[in-house]
Amino acid sequence: MSSRHRQTDERREWAAYLQQHNIARVLDNLVADMLSHKPAEPESFLALTALGLSAPEAQAMIDRGLHHKIRQMVDDMKKQCTTPAQDLAAFPGPASSNAPAPVVEALFDSTTSTLTYVVHNPETRDAVIFDPVLDFDANSFQTRTDSLARLIAVVEAKKLNVHYVIETHVHADHLTGAGWLKQRLGCNSVISSRVKGVQETFAQHLDMPTLKCDGSQFDKLVEDGEKFTAGSLVIECIATPGHTPACTCFKIGGLLFTGDALFMPDFGTGRCDFPNGSADDLYTSIHDKLYALPDETRVFVGHDYQPGGRALKYETTIRACKAQNKQLTAVTAREEFVAWRRTRDAGLAPPKLLYQSLQVNLNNGVLPSKGANGKRYMIIPLNGLKNTDEVGQ
C-alpha cells in the first residue's frame, strides 16, 4: 500500500471516529455553554483531546473561553467528516497529541496491606489520590500520620495540585486519611452516591443516631457512568457493587483503579459478606463490566496480601485477569463463582479494624467528637456477631 493510500485510510478512520463519538455535537454544546457562561462538561475536554490537542492546550482553551477557536475547529472537522474518501488526503488529519500518560505513584501500608495511589499529569501537575490511610494502632488506640506524611512528601516533591481524594468504597480494614488531607491540601473528596445506604445500615448497627446518612460529609457524590475532571485529568466512574453496595472503580485513560473488587490474579476478588454485599453482584461487576474493558487496560488493585509470601505486586491488566484470576476468569460460570465466594466468605473472620474503621470512614475521615471529659471514644459492639445474655451465655 502506498504512503498516500495509508494516510488516506488513517484519516478516513479518524473521521469515522469523530462521527461515531458525536464530537461535533459535544463541542457545539461547549460553545453554547461558554457563551452562556456555564461550566464546561467533562466530555468537552475529551472532545478537544480527540481533535489532537494536548491536555494543557485543551484545558487552557476551556479556561480562557476561546469559543471562536473551538467553533473554527468544529467547522473544519465537519468538512472533513463529509468529504468524499478520495479527497480526504487534502486535509491534515488529526494533530499529533503530545499529552503524556498519567503517572501513578503507589504507596503501600504493610499493616493493612492497603495501596494508596497518587495519579498525576506530569505536565500540568494535576493530581488525585486514591484510598489514603490514617495509621491506627489497635493496641494503644492511637492514630498516627506516618503514611500520610509519606504521601505529602510525594505531593510536595513533585509540586502536585491535588484536586480530589477519591474513595473506592467505605473501607472496613483501615481508617481513611481523607479528612486529614482535605485539611492539609484544601482538596475535595469523592465517593459513590450509594454511600448513603451504607451509612444508614451502619448507623443502626453501631447505634450512631447523630450520623448524617445523606452523604453530606463528602464533597462530591458520583453516579455510575459519570465523568468528571480534576484539571486536565478526566475520571470515569464505574459502579462495581458486590464487596459493598457502594463500591466504584475509577478509570483515568487506560488506567483502572479497582479498590476491593478485583485483586491481583493470584489472589482473586473481594469478599462479599458485609451487609448488602453480594457475590452475584460482584460477578456482574467484574465479569460483565470490567472484563468488557480493553484487554490492555492497566489495573491497579486496592490491596495486595502477598500470597505465599511473594514480593509486593499491585499492577496487572484486564487481559491477565480474564485469563488468570484464580477465582473469576472470563470463562468462569456465574453459579460456580457465586457458590465458591459464599462458601469462602462463610469461613472468614471479620476485619481486625472493622468497627474502628467504619466509624471514621462513614464520616469521611473525621474522628468521633470529644466527650464531656475532652476525650474521643469509639463504639465497639460486644458480641456484635452473635448476641448473648448478660453473662455471655
Image (cartoon, rainbow, N blue to C red):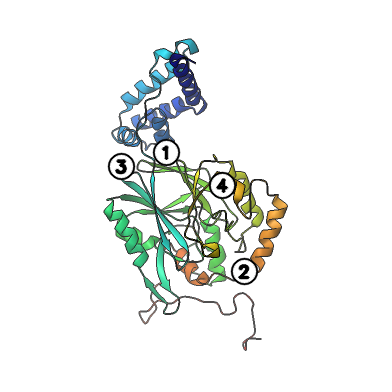
Disc 1, SS? helix
Residue at numbered disc 4: 320
Residue at numbered disc 1: 42
Work out whether 59 lies above or below 284. Answer: above
Q: Check residue 348 in the rendering and tell me which mark sits there, or answer none.
A: 2
Residue at numbered disc 3: 124
Disc 1 versus disc 2: distance between alpha carbons? 41 Å
The residue drawn where x is 57% and y is 70% is 350
> In the rendering, at what x and y percent does residue 127 appear?
35, 48
> Is residue 366 in sight in this rendering?
no
Disc 3, SS? loop
Residue 49 placement, left or right of 225:
left
The residue drawn where x is 51% and y is 77% is 380
The residue drawn where x is 60% and y is 50% is 324
**Of pointers 4 and 3, the one earlier in the residue sequence:** 3
Residue 274 placement, left or right of 227:
right
Which quadrant is home to the C terminus? bottom right
